[in-house]
Amino acid sequence: MAAGAVLPATALLLAACPSLDELRVGSGDAATEHRAPPPSDAAAPKEEEAAIPCHADAEWDPKNCGSCGHDCLGGACTEGVCQPVVLYTGDTPVSIVVDGPTLYVAVQTVLVNAGYVFRCTTADCMASMTVLASGELEPWVAVKQDGGIYWANLGGSNTAIDPGSVMGCRANACPEAGPTSYTPDGGGMEGGINVGGLAADETYLYWSETFGPASDHSAIYSCVPSECAATRATLQPGFGFVFALTLDSNYLYWIAAGPNEVHRCELPSCGGSPQIVAYIPAPTDKTVGLSGIALYGENAYWTDGLDDGGTVYGCPSSGCPPSGPSIVAKDQSDPALIAADDSGVYWANTGDGTIRRCSLQGCTEAAVIARTYAPFAVALDAVSVYFTSSSGIGSVLRVAK
């Protein structure tokens, strides 16, 4: 990958099966608008904090930026707006996990099989950076479960030669022998897999596999990490490209890129047919590009990653009303991954290089909270938004909420 290239994880979905670009994940041609009422339990829009009289210059004081007591957490304050802080710079980070003061980051490189996963402290990432695993085959999504860190290796363009996998190790260090593979046989009915999504709860790992070559079929699996070979189970066969797994205490959710749907099934066994949470119809000869999904409270939020006219949607996670999902934000520029908490919904607009925020209820115009080149992944803690610049020479950044 050239130094200025954008986001390999979304571009490397192989000759062996449909690419994310071909499936319009993160790109596309048109958006279809649905104007259902907003989620019934959505929080009120986050208003800008009222200025509290104090002696600070709220336009430029990083400890009192925009309002008294609003700390930029190491970033500069410019005209009342906190600026991002660069935590890591180097290769192409594509996934972030925030766990208290610790970050876990999955990184791709110019070489397909030279990816790595590292951890660091948020206070001093470059100085505290510890590489947990290297020589990974396009790592592109990571999750933390209990004392372990796990990631999905997307795999190469020829899955028979370079199959994807699910890998993991203890969160503080991998053994000298390297991380554990939870897909040791390479999987796949036709000589290899790509791993399109990964999630974890306190007991199980869940992942989706797309079979290659030239297959449009996929399936979702689970296992108990400590005894994965003995407990591995097929939860849900699927069609289209299954990715962007997430879960709550009762259900597993995912995006089915072929039929343009958000699905869920009941845990732990996922028995029976999945429930369709949302369907986004597309105009004739067009394909929507569902890209990322997040849960918060009783609602699901997801992005339709179109270059021009992308949309952020939301509806109750139990299922959208017959009128369809509500629009959280429209006219977005290739929205990618998404996160939500009580302060709002955040996502990365890859097309225009912005990190944006709306209230949980939605907004007329999404607030720009940061700008960077080729943003992709977003993660939250109580006070900060973390995001990636997923270019050839990329970075992980943080900005105060």
Image (spheres, rainbow, N blue to C red):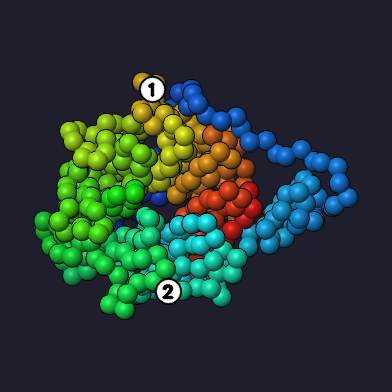
Inspect the image, locate mark 1, and give the three-letter code of the amino acid beneath it: Pro
Where is residue 359? Give x, y as percent. Answer: 57, 36
Is residue 99 positioned above or below 269 on the image? below
Sooner in the amino-acid sequence: mark 1 or mark 2: 2
Residue closest to the far right: 55
Where is residue 391? Give x, y as percent. Answer: 48, 65
Is residue 286 positioned above or below 130 on the image? above
- The circle on residue 131 is 2
Residue closest to the far left: 189
Q: Residues within 10 Å of mark 1 (few under 14, many from 20)?
A: some
CA separation in Å, label 1 and label 2: 46 Å
Give the quadrant of residue 87.
bottom right
Which residue lies under the disc numbered 1?
A: 321
| Residue drawn at x 64%, y 53% as measured from the top left | 400
Inspect the image, locate mark 2, and give the three-letter code of the amino acid beneath it: Val
Q: Name the residue nearer the viewer: 282 or 389.
A: 389
Where is residue 289? Give x, y as percent. Answer: 37, 44
Q: Which image quadrant: the N terminus?
A: bottom left
Q: Is residue 367 left or right of residue 172?
A: right
**Are the residues tagged 1 and 2 within 8 Å (C-beta)?**
no
Q: Name the residue nearer the viewer: 28 or 209.
A: 209
Where is residue 124? Give x, y as percent. Answer: 59, 69
Residue 348 seen from this side = yes
Residue 113 seen from this side = no
